[in-house]
Amino acid sequence: MIAFKLAFRNLFNAGLKTWLNVFVLSLAFISLVFFNGMIDGWDRQAEVDTKDWSIAEGQFWTPGYDSYDPFTIKESHQVLSHEVQQLIKNKQVTPVLLTEATAFPEGRMQTVLLRGMDVNQDILKLPLEKLKGKKNAVLIGSGMAKTLKLKKDDELMVRWRDKNGTFDAITFTIVYIFDCDVPSIDYGSLYMDIEALRKLTGMDNEASILISNDKNLTAIDSWVYKDNDFLLADIKEIISAKKTGGYVMTFFLLLIGLLAIFDTQVFSVFRRQKEIGTYIALGMTRQRVVSIFTIEGATNSILAALLGTVYGTPLFIFFTRHGISLSDTADMGSMGITASDIIYPYYSVGLIGSAVLLIIISSTIVSYLPSKKIANINPTDAIRGKVS
Amino acid sequence: MIVETKHLIKKFPVGKSFFTALNDINIHIDKGEFLGLVGPSGSGKTTLLNIIGSLDVPTEGNAHVLGKSIKDLSAKESAILRNRHIGFIFQTYNLFPVYSVYENVEFALLLQKKTASERKTAVMQALEWVGLTDKAKARPNAISGGECQRVAIARAMVKNPELVIADEPTANLDKANSFHILDTMKKLNKELSTTFIFATHDEKVMKFLDRIIYLEDGKVINDETIKTESL
Ligand SMILES: Nc1ncnc2c1ncn2[C@@H]1O[C@H](COP(=O)(O)OP(=O)(O)OP(=O)(O)O)[C@@H](O)[C@H]1O
Ligand SMILES: [Mg+2]
């Protein structure tokens, strides 16, 4: 306890230098919490968004279908059995029919995916009800609209091959543009009534995938079940890659903070020889002096955590309430990253606890390294301030 | 007996050979002595004080201080000996600049398991001995050199040690201040029977001493007891 008492006395009395070290270290602490909180919040949000817009509680794929391989789309459709129809009626699953097509916005050519969906579904957030009672109508996402330079009520010529491989074409009207943070939903797809698509393609009563809102539903006859761990794996990977960016920044701040402490410690051990000698004369062992100096250095990190908490808490509360706007920084959607314009960070106890631990442990180490030199100091020289 | 040395030899490595700083020192120091080690620069005064204060160990022979064999003490035992039983006063005061006068004096007691009120009583008593109760809250850089050395005396005396070791305590002080602190120490020596050992070549100090051990080239060349009039 006396070590802490002395450490605090020495630190407070060292004034500006201490506060500079503590401030830099507190920035590292805050940035660590800030970035990770943002990533965690984003992670949670992306997961929620993806579930809301794309996967709900899992999907069932036609055997052979692979969402990563567009060549599988053509063959991936099957007739819905009685069992599936029953599940649809019970609103446990909703069918999606996929057909590859080519769109011609303003004479340019663009491969698109026609997604036929039930206009009465309420498993996903997609506003398919906007299609009700409209002929040759499609919905698109706002990102897609931007890419194709299309507005609401614009017309879009689309060509596809029907069941028998012959080309067919139709002009759709864009009846609604929706906002969605999930790029795989926004980009590259046209949404239409599944009944209309079935007619156009001659795939009566067929679907390519089923989207489930029942976690416990894991098998439907020949359909291949894909759980959310599988379906969310991509997002998690992208987000953890983003995390690295935040770590780099935090790492540099931490490095600067730790270097400042290290430098102060080296300087202290060198300059405070007389004090060290006097500690020993007054009845401390050299080991004890080493621990006092180490604790003194490490106490910087405790002060940093306290200071960080003082100015960080209102900041974090603000961000948790109002979110962090990403819209100016980058167009994440077009980069294939699920990100809403505003991210609500999530600061968990575990996150803050581990940030505090990291700072304390690392600063204890950098404080100890120079301090352990004290164990070799000759007290009789030190007392006279002789530097050896 | 407070200090006894037997065939005490201290050698320092110098390059590939050794320099003998103390050469066969045999002295006895009794409780309540007010004694000085006197001799030219390099004669070994500080070296001898360091060994008596268990800050250093003999190369050959031994010193017994307060019944402890200096060469056999562990780091912890010698730390305890210094903390509880030996007070140190240095030429350069060696006060902790970041602590107040009060905290400087209190320091040794913090290492002992004394309660806050015990510490307070002892610190105020020690400050009273040196006449600095009104400067308790000051920082060392805000008081004069003479006052600093009086704080150092209070710090050495606060634990009521059997032995106080003072290496050239007046070397940085003017005549009036030297006189003042010697007077203070002499009084404490009389009142509390604390043993004082000085290293000095200051004439002013010698006038106060009861006994002078003359050192030259690491040897005792004279040991005289002086009958001083009580001041
Ligand atoms: N750590 C050391 N290494 C080598 N030589 C040393 C060491 N300490 C002291 N000496 C030498 O031992 C001799 C005695 O030194 P000491 O400091 O005891 O003298 P002193 O009588 O206190 O002198 P002064 O009056 O100058 O303080 C000196 O010649 C000094 O150079
Ligand atoms: Mg000396």
Image (cartoon, helix red, strand yellow):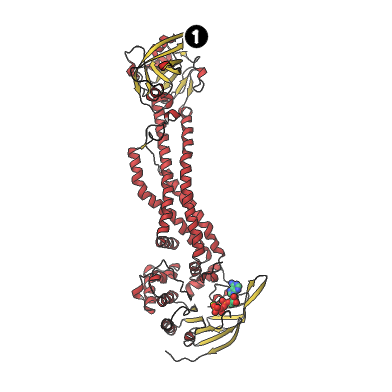
Name the spot of residue B145 as percent of width and height, x first: 42, 76
Whether residue B183 sits left or right of residue B10 in the image: it is left
Which image quadrant for residue A142? top left
Q: Where A373 falls versus A362 (above or below)?
A: below
Q: Quadrant of the C terminus of chain A?
A: bottom right
Q: What amino acid type should be assigned to the residue bearing mark 1? A: Gly
The secondary structure type at the circle numbered 1 is loop
Q: Quadrant of ligand 2?
A: bottom right
Whether residue A90 can be seen here: no
Query: Residue at 49% of width from left, 88% of height from top?
Result: B210
Query: Residue at 33% of width from left, 38% of height from top?
Result: A322
Subunit ID for the residue under disc 1: A
Name the spot of residue B20 as percent of width and height, x first: 63, 77
Q: Where A358 falls versus A161 (above or below)?
A: below
Q: Where A77 falls versus B159 (above or below)?
A: above
Residue lying furthest right: B16
Residue lying furthest front: A107
Name the spot of residue B155 as percent of width and height, x first: 43, 74
Query: Which residue is labeled 1 in the image?
Result: A165
Closer to the camera in the image, A45 or A284? A45
Bin the neighbour count of mark 1 within 10 Å (Cα to Cα): few under 14, some 14-19, many 20 and up. few
Name the spot of residue A198 as percent of width and height, x first: 42, 11
Whether residue A265 sits left or right of residue A213 in the image: it is right
